Image (cartoon, rainbow, N blue to C red):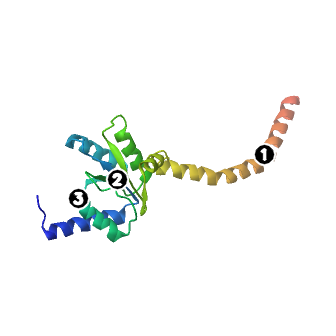
Amino acid sequence: MAFTKKQKGDMTARYENWLSESQALFVLDYTSLTMKDVDAFRAKARECGGEIHLVKNTLFNRALESQGYHGGNLFEGTSLVGFAFNDPPALAKTFTDFIKGNETRRIKGGFLGKEAITEQQVKALSDLPSLPVMRAILLGVLQAPASKLVRTLAEPARSLAAVVKAYSKKAPVAA
């Protein structure tokens, strides 16, 4: 189906909007996928705060250039693009889980920020913990010195209380 100039301009504008809002994007070759597979994949991507779209390569390349993305010849053949709006590692994990066990599916690569990343880098990104887990780890690291300080300050009082309790058990009870 041929698109008019206006439709192409609308599609490019939509692509540019997705690119400006996303923190990362990942590209998958979808030649062997059925629409049922694509729909299931889209549902999993939505769960982690991302979106999956089939794109027109030429128009998407124009949008990439206009948004300042550098490198990568990812858009040859069929392209299914995942946009990570909130949590890039979670969407990368969704992509790597989707291709496991099926040799016909492959990740072409992607972009983190505006720099191109390879398939291996997408897989490495998928090994990172998700954003809530990273926040919890960071919070634990930040709270550790304060909790150690509180324990250190409370230790003499706890020791004194233990000594008093031991003496109270040792002393005869007055009638």
Is residue 134 depicted above or below 116 in this figure? above
Question: Residue 165: percent from the left, percent from the top?
Answer: 81, 35
Is residue 168 depicted above or below 123 in this figure? above
Is residue 20 depicted above or below 50 in this figure? below
Q: Residue at x 11, y 61 (%)?
A: 2
Q: Secondary structure at mark 3?
A: loop
Quadrant in which the C terminus is drawn: top right
| Residue 16 seen in the figure | no
Amino acid under disc 3: Lys
Residues at badges 1 and 2 in contact (C-beta under 8 Å)? no
Between marks 1 and 2, how big is the CA–CA gap?
48 Å
Quadrant in which the N terminus is drawn: bottom left
Q: Which residue is mark 1?
A: 155
Give whichever of 33, 103 is nearer the camera.
103
Within 10 Å of the Cα at label 1, are there few (<14), some (14-19), or many (20+) other Cα atoms? Answer: few
Q: Residue at x 38, y 69 (%)?
A: 68
- First in sequence, mark 3 or 1: give its number: 3
Give whichever of 34, 166 is nearer the camera.
34
Amino acid under disc 1: Glu
Q: Which residue is mark 3?
A: 56
Question: Residue 62: percent from the left, percent from the top?
Answer: 28, 67
- In the picture as drawn, the residue positioned furthest to the right comes out as 171
Question: Residue 158: percent from the left, percent from the top?
Answer: 78, 43
Give whichever of 26, 76 is nearer the camera.
76
